[in-house]
Image: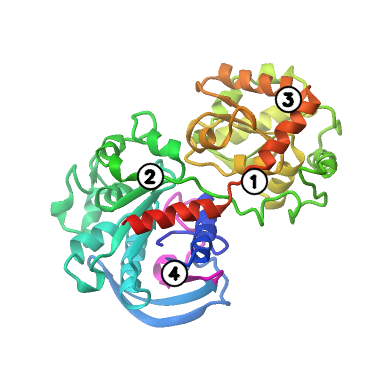
Amino acid sequence: MITSEAAPFAKTGGLADVLGALPPALAKLGEEVAVVMPRYGSMPLHGYTRIVDAMRLGVGPHLFTVAIDQVKREGVRYLFVDCPPLYGRAGVYGEAGIAAYHDNHIRFGLLNQAALEIGRSIFPADIFHAHDWPGGLLAPYLRENYGSDPDFAGAKTLITIHNLGYQGNFPATTISDLGLSPALFHMNGLEFWGELSFLKAAIVWSDAITTVSPTYAREIQTPEFGAGLDGVLRERAAKITGILNGVDYAEWSPDTDPYSNFPYSALDLSGKRRAKRALLEEVGLPVNETRPLIGIVSRFAGQKGFDLLEDIVPELAEMDFAMAVLGSGEAPIEAMFRAMAKAHPEQFAVHVGYDEGLAHRIEAGADMFLMPSRYEPCGLSQLYSLRFGTVPIVRATGGLEDTVDEVTGFKFIEYTPEALLGAIREALAAWADRRGWLERMRVGMAKDFSWDAAAVQYQSLYKSL
């Protein structure tokens, strides 16, 4: 597997969680799995074993000497490409004040070249499984530059699209940096609206394409969700499979949660009431157990649908519920939530930033969880919420459509403020039926979205290749 991040080594989002959980699940099935990723400057200095001191690699005209470090974890070999000039920085893709590093095309071009050399000399692979745009050049490098190399005879390539909105697009001139033939820069190859696209390259050259939910696999083939690549994807519809992401229940489960002092289960929900009281006190809201509490834990990004919320704040302020919000991101969304909390401090509590412990405590203490996403490839928070008996209110898109049904939660279809308001009103009305609500919680808590099922589907796909 080729990735830019994997938990617990480096994480900016859900991609890292997948690469921390799926490889061990495959190893449990008897697969041999190695994960190749950069060794970032933010990683600890110790705990790694250096297995290669000097590996010489080229990315077009750029020559590098890298080391390879290894960590073995849960039956998986995590192999880190150590190249301080490219990776010895504070961030993964960029850092404060730098949205994206200017040389990201070379940084991740090198990652793909390193993965191929590792596949030749350290870990001979039947499948090269790339994740999102940072792994996008693996397939064209393999097919165009190593096509006749006997070391790779029979090797197959797979790209998993975790979020089509992030494509790795660079100026056309960068092709000279990357060691690919300029003849490949055309509308049926590397070119995408005048730029070079890592993700399009993966879609065009890979033997198989997966997304992180079945509904998202269908959605990305439409203009609404295809981010300009829907035509390319429709041409390759036979190669596309949607496999739903899983959840690490060792980390996200109310009976064993490491961040809460009030464990509970579907058989004994008393701990959830105590978790709610503690959460209300922690975030500074009135301690009123009879008033429903809605939680939000999210990146503040346009994808997440919070523009719908902004349009209905006056109506929400007149309704009998409280809301605890945790997240950070785009400044206008942060400002919107701060304004809500300032205008209605008895109803809305907002923490801008990220706090892993508070995220867990919101899942445990809230009664409902809101995800009004414009699009959502898979989503993990709704899966956590179901296990915690925190009833999801979601838009019926992507993985939210696949994992929340009319029994376990509340869904709205149209991307409008009125539809969102209707779903919230429906949930608050259902809350009044305590016996029905408890049953709804218990049905959701019984759902199994563990990684075991996803791993079996990936294994089947590998074998078909």
Q: What is the secondary structure assignment of the residue under circle 1?
A: loop
Q: Nearer the viewer, mark 4 or mark 1?
A: 4
Q: Distance between the Cα atoms at labels 3 and 4?
A: 55 Å
Q: Residues within 10 Å of mark 2 (few under 14, many from 20)?
A: many
Kind of residue at disc 1 = Gly
Residue placed most toward the observer, 81 or 424 = 424
Between disc 4 and disc 2, whose residue precedes? 4
Residue found 54% across the figure and 35% down from its top: 400
Q: What is the secondary structure assignment of the residue under circle 4?
A: loop
State whether residue 238 is above or below residue 43: above
Image quadrant in which the C terminus is located: bottom left
Answer whether residue 315 is magenta in the image: no
Q: Residues within 10 Å of mark 3 (few under 14, many from 20)?
A: few
Image quadrant in which the N terminus is located: bottom left
Between disc 4 and disc 1, whose residue precedes? 4
Q: Nearer the viewer, mark 2 or mark 3?
A: 2
Q: What is the secondary structure assignment of the residue under circle 2?
A: strand
Q: Nearer the viewer, mark 3 or mark 4?
A: 4
Kind of residue at disc 3 = Ala
Q: What is the secondary structure assignment of the residue under circle 3?
A: helix
Between disc 3 and disc 1, whose residue precedes? 3
Q: Which residue is mark 4?
A: 32
In the rendering, at what x and y percent does residue 417 appear?
56, 19
Q: Which residue is mark 1?
A: 353
Give, as a single range, the part of the protein colored magenta: 73-102
Give the image quarter of residue 418: top right
Give the image quarter of residue 395: top right
Q: Distance between the Cα atoms at labels 4 and 1?
A: 38 Å
Circles 3 and 4: CB distance less than 8 Å? Answer: no
Kind of residue at disc 4 = Glu
